[in-house]
Image (cartoon, grey):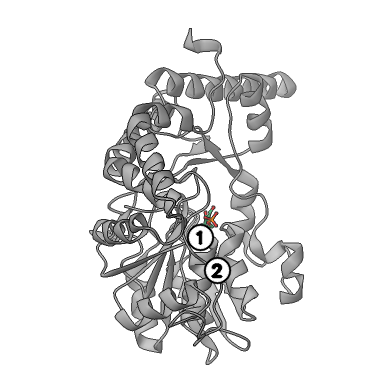
Amino acid sequence: MENNNPIPMLDLQAQYAQIKPEVDAALMRVVASQHFINGPDVEALEHEIARYCQVKHCIGVSSGSDALLVALMALNIGPGDEVITTPYTFFATAGAIARLGARPEFVDIDPATFNIDSRAIADKVTPRTRAIMPVHLFGQCADMAPILEIARKHHLAVVEDAAQAIGAEYKGHRAGSMGTFGCYSFFPSKNLGGFGDGGAVVTNDATLANQVRLLRGHGSSPKYYHKLLGGNFRLDTIHAAVLRVKLPLLDSWSALRQEAAAHYTNLFAERGLGAWMQTPPVLQSRHIFNQYVVRVDGRDGLREHLKKHKISSEVYYPLPMHLQECFSGLGHKQGEFPESEQAALTTLALPMFPELTAGQRQRVVDSVAGFVEARSSLGRRLAA
Ligand SMILES: Cc1ncc(COP(=O)(O)O)c(C=O)c1O
């Protein structure tokens, strides 16, 4: 029966069905308490996330975007400063830097992992550089050892954008635990997703943790006495309560994603599609597969073909940051970051979620193979 049903990118209803009694009870507990802001679940979640992410301090915030912003605010980053990051990311990374009046200084990506090319960072360090902001894209850590070494040498902060990578590891270290700050998103599509927007900042530095805590609540301490110019970056109690139900299940869900990813990769190899497409290499010790992203020629045609077969897919991301209209003032040109531009033209994310069945994966692979076969027979006919 499965054969004609649509295959979504992710299926949050299937996840909710597994944990409905616990989630509903947690929600009703918050409703009964009417303690919606800074309730006990927020503090409890912060301790649980800190333990899970192997860090000393965690501060729940309103989104992954705000986590990045408030981390940079705590570092006093502003006009005249430069922050090195990747152009091939979700907008929030570069957006947080630019919103504070600093300049995002882009370094192109490693085409194998789509993460910042750590070997190219040193050349971009100037006297104005204040921080490096690697992104652990799709759930796999950036190559952190050289990044941490450059940061140490030049006294730079490292802000890990781990929005897509909670629980991922680099040489046994959890994503977000290696830099000055780690930033997570609890957007519903993340491996640990809430019932709305949410995020967290983690750090091992007690002074910086206090700074973020202050900034999260308009910089006030005590109430109505404002030490710093902060904002309202709070995490709602309702989201914290839901996330506390989900966190103990996160590892099992990420393991199912890993299994699904390995299965996809094997099926593609068995169909002999290895030469035609790049399946995601697992180069770091724990890739949590927030997305399963392949690289193909003729990506847009494949997307149309999958759509006809009721298979969802997504392009992360169609336009790199240096070519975004709002960053035109940075003065970049087409061709400046060729690997990011190539990735934007060729990458395709396929359905990936813990409940994705083996039959669904087989259907996705069959459909991709059907597209390739149709294309090569067309090629043969045109050549004849
Ligand atoms: C790499 C990256 N950084 C930052 C964010 C921002 O997180 P949020 O949507 O929670 O604001 C996201 C979310 O999509 C992301 O993927």
Give the total number of marks visible in the rendering: 2
> Left or right: 97 with respect to 328?
left
The location of residue 6, given as percent across then percent down, is: 57, 20
Which residue ends up furthest to the bottom in the rendered image? 127
Q: Earlier in the sequence, mark 2 or mark 1?
A: 1
Residue 59, above or below 198: below
Q: Between marks 2 and 1, how big is the CA–CA gap?
A: 8 Å
Task: Kindly check if marks 2 and 1 are in contact, taking CB atoms under 8 A apart as contact.
Answer: yes
Mark 2: give few (<14), some (14-19) or many (20+) Cα within 10 Å: few
Helix, strand or loop at label 2? It is loop
Helix, strand or loop at label 1? It is loop
Residue 90, above or below 243: below
Mark 1: give few (<14), some (14-19) or many (20+) Cα within 10 Å: many
> Left or right: 366 with respect to 145?
right
**Residue closest to the eye, 239 or 352:** 239
For label 2, the residue is 232
